[in-house]
Image (spheres, rainbow, N blue to C red):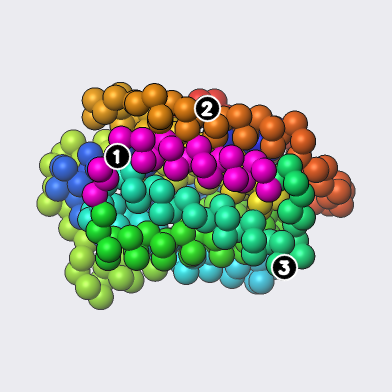
Amino acid sequence: MGPALCLLSAACFGAMPIFGKFAYAAGVTPATLLLVRFALAAVLLAALLLARPGLRRTAGGPVRLTAGLVLTGLGLGAIGYATQAGLYFAALRRMDASPLSLILYTYPLLVTVAAVLLGRDRLTPARGAALAVASAGTLLVLLGTGGVDFDPFGAALGFGSAATYSGYILIADTVVHRLPPVVLSALVMAGAAVTLTGHALVTGGAGLDFAPRAWLWLACIAVVSTVAATLAFFAGLRRTGPSTAAILSTFEPVVTTALAALTLHELLTPVQLAGGLLVLTSVAVLQLRRPARPPAPASHAPDPALVPQPATKG
């Protein structure tokens, strides 16, 4: 279930650049996109927790929300997720989605190396090979068309997004076993919404003077590529660990490229298809040979009935 949830999350996130490009075409600014995205996501998650109180519980019983846990969850959103998303969407406005995705996907290597250095994971031969194969496949997928545009400042924003996301994953891994995914996701989205609301009030950078069709793309970003993607990611992360979750997330650019072909009429080349096959193969190898994690304490063990189940990935 853990690898499947990580793949589900990757596919949901993979659709986001497509939604973002359509939203930009309808007149939405990055500041408005981010504010609407996180505010709507926070409201949806809060409504879900009110409608289904059981989602606030773990297998051991009701969750005790300490000040430290709440502040960590809010901080993940207010500092980590808001910063990562702001850098990413600022870069997306300056660059094509494919080269930006390539830059962002330096983060699995950063996460794996950092987790090993911190003593929180082991770089086994199988995991190292899976990372190398997945990275090579992603490179083929994203560069298979050739002649991609390159914007130095956009690239710098992209690298900043990758570094921020790496830290976000490692910090999130310290609390995913102590909070149900929906509770943690709600805290993250609320924290990000507060930061972006403050930014909008100070800069006046958010406005709603865009085409009505943009609301469709904003809703898709909030529901599919934020709420569903984040819930699936946290649920998968608590089962697999940070390195495996990061490597499995290399499925995201495969989804982005496929959706771009379907919606933007960009044909996949044989090189891209080969790259996608490498990524999917590495995912299968990783799942078959993934080292077993020690069982979590009973009070932290995930209750399958309380973990969001994937309906469709997108």
**Mark 3, residue position:** 118
Q: Earlier in the sequence, mark 1 or mark 2?
A: 1
Cα–Cα gap, marks 1 and 2: 19 Å
> Does 289 sit above or below residue 124?
above
Whether residue 310 is in magenta: the answer is no
Q: Earlier in the sequence, mark 3 or mark 1?
A: 3
Residue at mark 1: 146
- Image location (x, y in percent) of residue 93: 23, 53
| Left or right of 136 on screen, residue 84 | left
Residue occupying the point 56% across, 40% down: 134
Given the image, on which type of amino acid does mark 1 rest?
A: Gly
Determine which residue is flagged by label 2: 277
Give the x, y percent position of residue 201. Answer: 26, 71
Whether pointer 3 and pointer 1 mark residues with C-beta atoms closer than 8 Å, the reply is no
The Cα–Cα distance between marks 3 and 2, rounded to whole angstroms, is: 32 Å
- Magenta extent: 128-149
